[in-house]
Image (spheres, grey):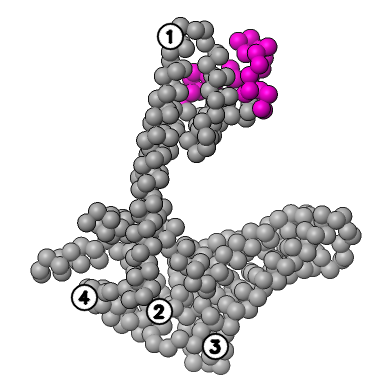
Amino acid sequence: LDHAEFQDMCDVLQFEFHITERDACLKQCMKGTCVDRTMTAFMENDSTGPNLGYTCRYPGSIMDKIMNAVIGLNVVWVFTESVVDLNDWEEGPYFQYADLFFSFVYVLEAALKLCHWSWAEYWYHGDNRFDFLASMLMGAAGLLFLLLQQVSVTLLRRVNLLRLLRVLKAMQHMKFYQRTCTIVSQLLTTCREVLLLNLLVVLIWASGGVQLFGGQLVESNPRLEGKDLGYFSSHYQVFNFNDVPMGMVTLFVWTLGDWNDDIALACLELADPWTAYKALIWTFLISYYIASPLLAYNVLSAFSIDVYQKIDEEVQNQEEKGYELCEVERNLLLIQVEMASNGLVLHMKESADLAKLRIHTALFS
C-alpha cells in the first residue's frame, strides 16, 4: 500500500456497516406468483440494476406516490378542522370517520411495507421507525375509540398530528430541501464540540447563579421591596435562578440577545455596597459576560460560518462533479451488488467522526 491507499483504507474502516435481509418471509414464500409481481409493481419504482433494498426501490413507487397524496389530504383536513374549531362551527358526523381513516391508513402502509421488506431492512431506516411507532399509536387510539369509546375525538386528532411530520419526509424529493438537510446535519456534527463548550459554560454559571440568587428575585424579598426596579415593572420574573434550568434560560437570554441590565441590577440589589457578597455578584456577572458572549459564543459564531461555507462549497462540488470514489469504496460497491444477488443488503454509512474529519481537513489544510 502506498500512502494514499493507506489513507483511503483508514477512512473506509471508519464507515458503519450493517447487513440486513432484503425480502420479507411472505415475499419469499410467494416468489414468482402473480401476488409477488403485483406487490413488486406496487411497492417498487422503475429503477433498473441490482436491488439494493428499501432506499433504492421504494422512493417514487406507486405506494410512495399514494402516501404522499394521503399526507397532502391529511394536511388539508387538519387545516379544515382548525377553521371549524376556531369559528365554533358544528362538526358533521363524518368528521370522526375521516379522523379514523387517517389513523388506519398509515397502519396499512406499515403492514404492506413489512409484507414486502424484512423487519431488519424496514427497521434500519429512521423514517420507518418513526412511521411504525406513530402508526401503532394512532391505530391503537382508533381501535379504542371504535371498540370502547374511551378515546375522545380531540385526542384522536392530536395523535394524528404526529403524522404531519411525514410532510418533511415527502419534501425529500425537493433538491433544495435535501441540500439544506445535508448542510445542517454536517454543520451540527462538525460544530458539536463547540456547541457543547457553550452549553457547559452556561451550565456552570447557572449552577453558580442558583447558589447566589436562588429564590431571592421576588417582590416579597425585603431587600427588593419598594425599589423601582425594571426587573419587576417589565415583568422579567420568569428569568430567575430558582433552579438550574431556569438559570440556564436566563443566561441564554444574556448570551443570545442584548445584555439585560434590569436582570443584572436586580441581582446587584441583593447585596449591600462594599461587601464580599457584592463583589461576588460583580465577579459572577463580569466573568460570565467574558466567558460566554465574548469568548465561547463568538468562537461558535465564527467557526460555524467558516464550516458552513466549506460544507456548502463541498456539497456544490459534489452536485456538479459527483462524489469521487476511491478504489476501496469501488470494491465495496461490488461486494454490495454481489450480496444483493443473494437477497442481502449491505448498508454503508460514513461515520459522524469521519465526516467531521473531512471538513476539518478541508478547512485547515
Q: Secondary structure at mark 1?
A: helix
The residue where tag 1 is placed is 276
Mark pair 1, 4: CA separation: 67 Å
Q: Which mark is residue 52?
A: 2
Decide which of tag 3 and tag 2 comes sooner along the chain.
3
Q: Which mark is residue 41?
A: 3
The percent coordinates of residue 102 (x first, y second) are 70, 68
Q: Nearer the viewer, mark 1 or mark 4?
A: 1
Majority secondary structure of magenta residues: loop
The percent coordinates of residue 365 (x first, y second) are 22, 56
Mark 1, other Cα within 10 Å: few <14 / some 14–19 / many ≥20 = few
The residue where tag 4 is placed is 327
Decide which of tag 2 and tag 1 comes sooner along the chain.
2
Which stretch is magenta? 207-235
Q: Quadrant of residue 260?
A: top right
Mark 3, other Cα within 10 Å: few <14 / some 14–19 / many ≥20 = some
Q: Quadrant of residue 223?
A: top right
Looking at the image, is 285 positioned above or below residue 114?
A: above
Horizontally, residue 123 falls left or right of residue 135, namely left
Decide which of tag 1 and tag 4 comes sooner along the chain.
1
The percent coordinates of residue 308 (x first, y second) are 39, 56
Mark pair 3, 2: CA separation: 16 Å
Decide which of tag 2 and tag 4 comes sooner along the chain.
2
Residue farthest right in this picture: 90
> Residue drawn 71% across and 55% down?
158
